Image (spheres, grey):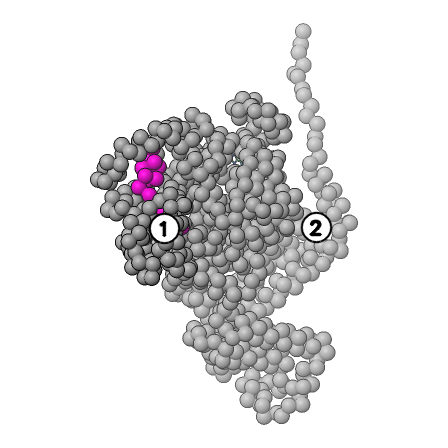
C-alpha cells in the first residue's frame, strides 16, 4: 500500500491585504483630517528649515527678544510687577504683528513717522524701505531690555538683556557690513547655545563640527534634516508624554500600550513609509510621520517610568494637603520625573536621527537624500559626507539634551545634597 | 463636639471585603477569614478625640495604624463605618469637598518626612497654603512664622536634602503648622530619628501643643513614646482596639493579658510624666489673709498650700504652722516660702525624685508662663511607681515602706 505524504493545509491569513484595506478605509473617510495634519507639519518644517538656513533680521531679533523674555519670566519673583510687564510687551507685539499681517496698518504708521529715524537702518541693510516685522521685533527687544534694566536689580538679567541686544546688533553688522554669510552666523548661535547649556567642550565641538558641515557644503541639507528632526521630536513628545502620564496613572492603560509600543519599535522602520506615503504622498511630511511613530515609544516608556518612580509618600503628601490630582502632577510628579522624561526625549531625538536617512527614501530631502543617492549611485564620497554630517548632528543633539537635564529641579536638589 | 470621631471603622483590602466585614463583625479573628483572600487592616475601631488632645495610636507593625490614620483624612476610604471631622462625616463627601477638608481642617506629618526635594525649605513649609490658593506674600509670612516656631529660622532658602533628619522632620512639622489646621495627623513622625533627637522632638511637640492647642493624632509603635506624648492612648492589636485610656490607666489596669504583657517591661518612672501623675493643687490667693488661708487648707485636709497671684502664677508655698503664728495684718507675704521646685508637665517622674527628696513641699507643675497646673506630693510620686494589681490598701503600705527609700532618690532610677 503506497502512502501519499500527509499534507496539512494552513489557510492563508490575508494580514497584509487587511492592513491595506484598513488604510484605504482611513484615507477615504478621514482624508481631510490627514490633509490638514500634513499641511501643518509641512509648513512647520519649511518654516524651521528657512529659519535655520536663511534667518531674516526680524527672526534673529525676535530670538534675542525671546531669550530676554525667558530670563525675565524665570526671575518674575524678583521683579516689580512680576510677569506683567514682560507679558504686556509680548502681547503688544503679538497684536501689532497680527494687525500688520492682516491689514498692513503698522506699515502706514511707520510710513508717517519722520524718515531720519529709519535712515540709518535702511542704509545698514541696504534696503529702500522699512520692513515692519523687523521694526516690531526691534521695538519688542528694546522694550524688554528697558524692563530688564529698570524693574530688577539682578545683575545676571542686566547682562542677559544687554548681551542679547549687543549680539543682535553685532550679527547685523557682521552680516550686512562685514559680509559674513548667514550659515556662519547660525553656526555661531549654535556654539553660543552649546556654551550656555553644556560648556566649552561642546561649544568647541559644535564650532568644529558645524564648520566641517559648512565646508562639505552640506549646511542646507543638514539644516533641513535638523528641521525635520525637531518637528518630529516636538510632535512625538507632545503625543508620548501625555500617554506616558496616563499609563503611569492607570495600570490597565499601561498593560494595553506595552505590546503596542513593542510593535511600533520593532516593526522595521521602512514599513512605516508605505502607509505614510499613501496618506501624505511623497515629501517631508511622510518622513516626519514615519519618524514620529518610530521614535515615540521611548518617550512614552520613560515618561511612565519617571512618574512611577516619584516617591509614593510625596504624592500622598500632596493629597494630604488637599491638592487636586492635576496640580500634584504639575508641581510634584512632572518636576521630579523631568530628568527621566528628558532621557526619553534624548532617545526620541536619537531615533529620529536614525530615521532621517530612511525618510530620505520618500523624498524628505536633507542629509537622508544625500545618503540615499550615494547608495543609489554608489557614490561613496556623497554618501559618506552625508553620513558624517548626521554624526555631527547626532553628537551635538545628544550632548545638548543630556546637559539640559542638569537644569531639572530634581538634579538641582541632588547637587545641593552633596 | 469631638474634633475627630471614628465609628465602627473597618478597612479590608481585597475583593470580598464586604463579606469579610460581616464575618469580622461577628467577632472572628482576622486569621480565621484567611480563605477569603483579604487583608483586614482595621477592624471595628471606634474612638473620639477631643479638641486640644494628643491622642496616640499604638500597635506593633502590621496592626493597622497607618491604614487607620489614612482613613481619618480620607486618603483611604473605609470599607465600612464613618469618620467625622469637626462634625462632618467625611465618608460622604465628594472628592472636591474632601480636598477642602484636608486643606483647611486636617494636615499630616509623615514618617519619612515626604518633603518635596525640588522646593526650598520655605516653599515646602508654605505648601499647604499654596494649595489653598493664598497669595505669595501671605503664605511666605506664615511659613516663616512656623519655621521659626520649630527653630529653623535662617534655613528658609536651603533645599531639604541639605538638612539633617531631625531638621527635615521639623520642616515637615512646620508645613503642617503653617497649613493652620486644627488637627494634625502624625504617622510615626519620629520613628526615623535617632533616640536623642527623637526626645528633643517629643519635647518640642509637647511645648508646641501646649501653646498652640492643636488636636494631634500621633501614631507610634513605641510604648515609651506613646506614654510620654499621649493624653490618651489607643492600643491596636491585629486591627482591633485592645484598650483606650490614659497612660496611667493602661499601666495600672490593663484590660487584657496582651496589654499587660505589653506594658510589663515599661520603666514607669521614665514613661509617666509630672503631668500625668499630678493632683489638683491646694492653692490660696496672695490677697487672702492668713486666717482665711488656714481655713481653706483645713477644709482641703492639708497643711501646705501654694500661693498664687491673680493670674494664677506661682509665688511660693505656705504651711499651716507658719500661718498659725502669722500676724493677720502682715498678710501671706511674711510667711511665704519661695523655695519650691517647679517642673513642666512633660518632665519624667524619674526626674522628680531628687527634687522631692530635698524639700518638704510638694513639687509644683507649671506651664511655660509659670501658671500652676498641679502638684506632685511625695506620696503621689511613690504611688505612681506601684505596679498594677495592688488594691488601695496594699498601695498605702507600699507607700509607707517606700517612703524611706525615696530619700535617696537615686535608687529609683
Ligand atoms: N494597599 C494595601 N493593600 C493590601 N494590603 C494592605 C495595603 N495597605 C496595608 N495593607 C495591609 O494591612 C495591614 C496593616 O498595614 P498598616 O500599614 O496599616 O500597618 P502599620 O500598623 O502601619 O504597620 P507599620 O508599623 O509596619 O507601618 C498589613 O498587613 C498590610 O500588609
Ligand atoms: Mg505604618
Q: Which residues are magenta?
A: B372-386
* Same subunit, tags 2 and 1: no
Q: Which is more toward the observer, B158 or A187? A: B158
Local packing at callout 1 (Cα closer than 10 Å; few below 14, some 14-19, many 20+) is many
| Alpha-carbon span between mark 2 and mark 1 | 108 Å
Local packing at callout 2 (Cα closer than 10 Å; few below 14, some 14-19, many 20+) is few
Q: In percent of the image, x 52 and y 43: which residue is there?
A: B49
Q: Which is more toward the observer, A32 or B36? A: B36
**Extreme-top residue of the structure:** A1
Q: In percent of the image, x 42 and y 25: which residue is there?
A: B257
Q: Is mark 1 within 8 Å of ligand 1?
A: no
Q: Which is more toward the observer, B142 or A299? A: B142
Residue that carries the numbered disc 1 in the rendered image: B294
Q: In percent of the image, x 29 and y 49: which residue is there?
A: B321
Residue that carries the numbered disc 2 in the rendered image: A278
In front: mark 2 or mark 1? 1
Picture coordinates of residue A180 (x, y %)? 48, 77
Picture coordinates of residue A135 (x, y %)? 60, 81
Residue B79 versus residue A406 in the image, above or below: above
Callout 2: SS = helix
Numbered badge on residue B335 = none
Q: In percent of the image, x 65 and y 57: which residue is there?
A: A285
Kindly tell me whether residue B142 is visible in this rendering.
yes
Picture coordinates of residue B264 (x, y %)? 36, 30
Quadrant of the image containing the C terminus of chain B: top left
Q: Which chain is disc 1 placed on?
A: B
Amino acid at each position: 500500500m503506497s502512502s501519499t505524504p500527509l499534507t496539512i493545509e494552513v489557510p492563508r491569513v490575508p494580514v497584509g491585504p487587511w492592513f491595506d484595506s484598513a488604510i484605504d478605509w482611513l484615507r477615504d473617510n478621514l482624508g481631510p483630517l490627514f490633509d490638514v495634519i500634513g499641511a501643518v507639519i509641512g509648513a512647520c518644517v519649511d518654516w524651521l528649515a528657512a529659519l535655520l538656513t536663511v534667518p531674516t533680521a526680524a527672526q534673529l531679533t525676535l530670538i534675542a527678544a525671546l531669550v530676554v523674555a525667558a530670563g525675565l519670566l524665570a526671575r518674575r519673583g524678583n521683579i516689580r510687577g512680576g510677569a506683567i510687564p514682560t507679558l504686556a510687551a509680548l502681547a503688544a507685539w503679538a497684536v501689532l504683528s497680527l494687525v500688520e499681517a492682516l491689514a498692513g496698518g503698522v506699515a502706514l504708521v511707520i510710513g508717517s513717522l519722520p524718515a531720519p529715524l529709519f535712515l540709518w537702518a535702511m542704509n545698514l541693510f541696504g534696503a529702500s524701505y522699512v520692513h515692519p516685522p523687523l521694526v516690531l521685533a526691534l521695538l519688542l527687544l528694546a522694550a524688554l531690555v528697558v524692563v530688564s534694566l529698570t524693574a530688577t536689580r539682578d545683575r545676571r538679567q542686566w547682562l542677559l538683556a544687554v548681551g542679547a541686544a549687543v549680539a543682535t546688533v553685532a550679527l547685523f553688522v557682521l552680516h550686512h557690513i562685514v559680509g559674513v554669510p548667514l550659515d556662519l552666523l547660525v553656526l555661531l548661535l549654535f556654539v553660543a547655545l552649546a556654551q550656555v547649556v553644556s560648556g566649552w567642550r561642546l561649544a568647541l565641538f559644535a564650532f568644529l563640527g558645524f564648520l566641517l558641515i559648512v565646508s562639505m557644503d552640506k549646511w542646507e541639507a543638514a539644516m533641513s534634516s535638523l528641521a525635520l528632526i525637531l518637528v518630529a521630536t516636538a510632535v512625538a513628545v507632545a503625543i508620548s508624554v501625555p500617554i506616558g502620564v496616563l499609563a503611569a496613572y492607570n495600570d490597565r492603560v499601561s498593560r494595553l500600550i506595552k505590546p503596542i509600543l513593542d510593535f511600533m519599535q520593532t516593526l522595521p522602520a521602512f514599513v512605516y513609509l508605505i502607509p505614510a506615503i499613501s496618506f501624505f504622498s511623497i515629501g517631508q511630511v511622510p518622513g516626519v510621520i514615519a519618524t514620529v511613530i518610530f521614535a515615540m515609544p521611548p518617550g512614552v516608556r520613560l515618561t511612565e517610568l519617571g512618574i512611577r518612580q516619584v516617591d509614593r509618600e510625596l504624592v500622598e503628601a500632596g493629597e494630604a494637603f488637599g491638592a487636586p490630582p492635576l496640580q500634584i502632577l504639575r508641581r510634584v510628579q512632572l518636576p521630579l520625573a523631568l530628568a527621566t522624561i528628558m532621557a526619553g526625549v534624548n532617545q526620541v531625538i536619537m531615533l529620529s536621527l536614525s530615521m532621517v536617512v530612511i525618510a530620505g527614501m520618500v523624498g524628505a530631502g536633507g542629509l537622508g537624500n544625500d545618503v540615499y543617492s550615494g547608495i543609489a549611485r554608489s557614490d561613496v564620497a556623497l554618501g559618506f559626507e552625508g553620513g558624517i554630517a548626521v554624526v555631527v548632528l547626532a553628537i551635538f543633539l545628544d550632548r545638548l539634551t543630556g546637559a539640559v537635564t542638569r537644569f531639572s529641579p530634581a538634579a538641582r536638589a541632588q547637587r545641593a545634597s552633596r | 463636639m469631638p474634633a475627630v470621631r471614628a465609628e465602627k471603622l473597618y478597612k479590608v483590602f481585597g475583593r470580598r471585603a464586604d463579606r469579610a466585614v460581616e464575618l469580622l463583625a461577628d467577632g472572628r479573628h482576622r486569621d480565621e477569614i484567611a480563605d477569603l483572600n483579604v487583608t483586614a487592616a482595621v477592624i471595628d475601631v471606634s474612638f473620639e478625640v477631643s479638641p486640644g488632645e494628643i491622642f496616640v495610636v499604638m500597635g506593633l507593625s502590621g496592626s493597622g495604624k497607618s491604614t487607620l490614620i489614612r482613613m481619618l483624612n480620607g486618603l483611604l476610604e473605609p470599607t465600612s463605618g464613618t469618620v467625622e471631622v469637626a462634625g462632618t462625616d467625611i465618608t460622604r463627601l465628594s472628592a472636591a469637598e474632601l480636598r477642602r477638608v484636608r486643606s483647611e481642617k486636617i494636615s499630616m506629618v509623615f514618617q519619612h518626612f515626604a518633603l518635596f526635594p525640588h522646593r526650598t525649605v520655605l516653599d515646602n513649609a508654605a505648601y499647604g497654603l499654596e494649595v489653598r490658593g493664598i497669595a505669595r506674600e501671605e503664605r511666605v509670612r506664615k511659613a516663616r512664622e512656623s519655621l521659626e516656631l520649630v527653630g529653623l529660622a535662617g534655613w528658609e532658602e536651603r533645599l531639604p536634602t541639605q538638612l539633617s533628619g531631625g531638621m527635615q522632620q521639623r520642616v515637615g512639622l512646620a508645613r503642617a503648622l503653617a497649613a493652620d489646621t486644627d488637627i494634625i495627623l502624625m504617622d510615626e513622625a519620629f520613628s526615623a530619628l535617632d533616640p536623642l533627637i527623637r526626645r528633643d522632638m517629643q519635647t518640642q511637640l509637647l511645648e508646641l501643643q501646649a501653646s498652640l492647642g492643636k488636636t494631634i493624632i500621633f501614631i507610634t509603635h513605641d510604648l515609651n513614646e506613646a506614654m510620654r506624648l499621649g493624653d490618651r492612648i489607643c492600643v491596636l492589636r491585629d486591627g482591633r482596639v485592645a484598650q483606650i485610656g490614659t497612660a496611667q490607666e493602661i499601666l495600672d489596669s490593663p484590660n487584657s493579658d496582651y496589654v499587660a504583657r505589653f506594658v510589663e517591661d515599661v520603666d514607669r518612672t521614665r514613661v509617666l510624666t509630672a503631668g500625668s501623675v499630678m493632683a489638683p493643687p491646694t492653692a490660696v490667693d496672695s490677697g487672702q489673709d492668713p486666717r482665711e488661708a488656714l481655713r481653706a487648707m483645713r477644709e482641703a485636709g492639708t497643711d501646705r498650700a501654694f500661693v498664687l497671684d491673680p493670674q494664677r502664677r506661682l509665688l511660693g508655698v505656705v504651711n499651716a504652722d507658719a500661718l498659725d503664728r502669722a500676724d493677720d495684718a502682715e498678710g501671706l507675704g511674711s510667711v511665704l516660702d519661695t523655695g519650691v521646685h517647679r517642673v513642666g508637665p512633660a518632665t519624667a517622674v524619674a526626674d522628680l525624685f531628687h527634687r522631692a527628696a530635698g524639700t518638704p513641699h510638694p513639687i509644683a507643675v507649671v506651664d511655660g508662663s509659670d501658671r500652676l497646673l498641679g502638684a506632685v506630693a511625695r506620696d503621689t510620686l511613690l504611688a505612681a511607681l506601684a505596679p498594677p494589681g495592688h488594691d488601695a490598701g496594699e498601695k498605702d503600705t507600699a507607700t509607707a515602706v517606700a517612703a524611706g527609700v525615696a530619700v535617696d532618690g537615686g535608687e529609683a532610677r
